[in-house]
Image (spheres, grey):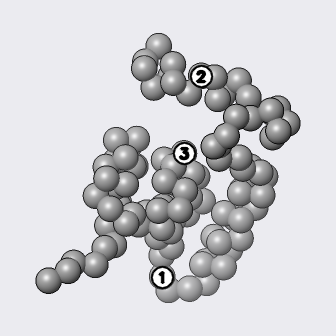
Amino acid sequence: MTADTDRISPARQLIGHDRTDVPTPALILDLPKVEQNLREMARRMAPLPAGLRPHAKIHKSPVLGQLQLDAGAIGLTTATVWEAAAMADAGLDNLLIANQVDR
């Protein structure tokens, strides 16, 4: 068991419990709704001559990033090098860092 697995194991045990049982702060998602939204994004993008590259700065989750890629995204956009590094460390690629360069 890795240190990361040890760290998230208690959280995994809360999957399926009532949301009031989860200590905060916590990200709680309605997974069927997430999957529905991913399918809808893919459906809307399908007829367009462009690829979808969603911004991961909101969720900052490699798990959600992978779901987006699995749903047809061509890659992910991050706001910082650190966000991109976290995605890359999780095995995700085709990352775009979109950030303003100040002069």
31 with respect to 85 (left or right):
right
The residue singled out by tag 1 in the image is: 50
Q: Residue 61 appears at what percent x and percent y? A: 51, 49
At label 3, which amino acid type do we have?
Val
Q: Secondary structure at mark 1?
A: loop
Sequence-first tag of 3 and 1: 1
Residues under numbered marks 3 and 1 in contact, where contact means CB atoms less than 8 Å apart: no
Tell me the quarter of the picture where residue 33 sits: bottom right
Q: Choose between 35 and 98: the one closer to the eye.
A: 98
Q: Which is more foreground, mark 2 or mark 3?
A: 2
Q: Which residue is mark 3?
A: 63
Q: What numbered label is drawn on residue 9?
A: 2
Q: Earlier in the sequence, mark 2 or mark 3?
A: 2
Q: Residue at x 59, y 22 (%)?
A: 9
Q: Residue at x 47, y 13 (%)?
A: 1
At label 1, which amino acid type do we have?
Ala
